[in-house]
Amino acid sequence: MVDMLLQYGLFLAKAITVVIAAMFVIITVANLGERRRHSEDDGDIEIMRLNDRYEHFADVLRMAVLDKAEFKAFLKSEKDREKAESKKDSAKTGDEAKGRRRIFVIHFNGDMRASATDNLRQEITAILTMAEARDEVVVCLESPGGMVHGYGLAASQLARIRQNNVPLTICVDKVAASGGYMMACLGNTIMAAPFAIVGSIGVVAQIPNFHRLLDKWDIDFEVLTAGEYKRTLTVFGENTDAGREKFVEELEDTHTLFKDFVKDYRPALDIAKVATGEHWYGRRAVDLGLIDKLMTSDEYLQTASKEADIFAVRFVQKVPLLQRVGLVAASSLDRVLLGWWERLVQRPRF
């Protein structure tokens, strides 16, 4: 029995060694691929005309519902309508000759680090090369918030649209809270689903401390700094009341900056009433002035497609298969380790 357990232990050790070695190789390949990707900027913009998608859905449904005579009559009427519109367009002059306005659609799904900002900046750059004041940018935004600096940069990217005098509409179907709302407040128009989560204008940070545990086992942990407030609270060192006061002071300052930012873009908002860290569902948020109307992104875009050309814009990184596998493995490991660390130590975040 002992010999069998020993053999099993040796086998298990070998298996773990192989797995660790394989993970090391995969992560190394992924890192090399990541450096290559950033050095060569190997990505491109993909465009999809959503009007075509809606028309395709309608055609498929008509083919299934209408009989042959009805479908044939429909096709003839559509052909006649297109000819009439073509003649009408050829007779237009000046601004009328420019045709229908354009709506550019971006999707932003935010995580703790707002990592989708890398693609967002490329998409906005592409759109601003030709977007005009009569056009519109729609951002379908989903985010519960995260790191202050990450969402600060994401919000600054959306500010570029406003600075170019292009109307910006934010659609929230599920959640735009904290850092997510910091991005949403830049919209000229903000709309949300009735039960979407909106608001949470606040800042939070939490940190465990193992000093007493280390002290119990006679383990010293030293933190050496230059500068009175280089380190306020630590995980393993002994925290002081002065350090706590300074940490809270920094949180309050971040909260003040957050409130001022929201107030700049939504001046009619009663900031003292909504900047308590609470969140609200869409039905309540519209009454508070956090959003402008109740509507899902699907409803808004499908309705707008009747009078505008709608284009979904997406920046896609082109990564070889081997590097893609490595990046997936590295990303999974990174999420596990980062999730563990963020539960242990949380820096200020929205």
Image (cartoon, grey):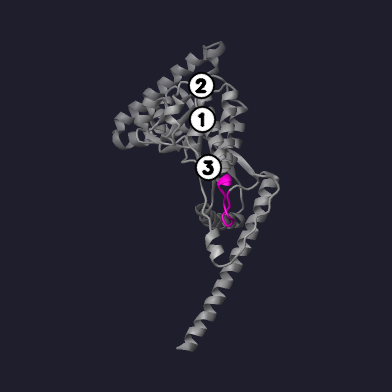
Q: Position of residue 294 (x, y in %)?
A: 37, 28
Question: Which quadrant, please, contains the N terminus?
Answer: bottom left
Residues packed near mark 1 inside 10 Å, few (<14), some (14 to 19) or many (20 plus): some
- Amino acid found under the numbered disc labelled 3: Arg
Look at the picture and state if 31 lies above or below 162: below
CA separation in Å, label 3 and label 2: 38 Å
Please name the residue that numbered disc 2 is placed on.
101
Closer to the chain start, of discs 1 and 3, is 1
Q: Position of residue 63 (x, y in %)?
A: 34, 36
Identify the secondary structure beneath mark 1. helix
Identify the secondary structure beneath mark 3. strand
Closer to the chain start, of discs 2 and 1, is 2
Q: Is residue 178 magenta?
A: no
Number of disc labels:
3
Please name the residue that numbered disc 3 is placed on.
349
Q: Position of residue 28 (x, y in %)?
A: 65, 60
Please name the residue that numbered disc 1 is placed on.
259
The answer to whether the residues at label 1 and label 3 have Cβ atoms under 8 Å apart is: no
* Mark toward the viewer: 2 or 1: 1
Q: Residue 53 sits in which quadrant?
A: top left
Front residue of this view, candidates 130 and 268: 268
- Amino acid found under the numbered disc labelled 2: Arg
Look at the picture and state if 220 lies above or below 166: below
Closer to the chain start, of discs 3 and 2, is 2
Residues packed near mark 2 inside 10 Å, few (<14), some (14 to 19) or many (20 plus): some
Which span of residues is magenta-colored?
Answer: 233-243
CA separation in Å, label 1 and label 3: 14 Å
Which residue ends up furthest to the front in the rendered image? Answer: 241
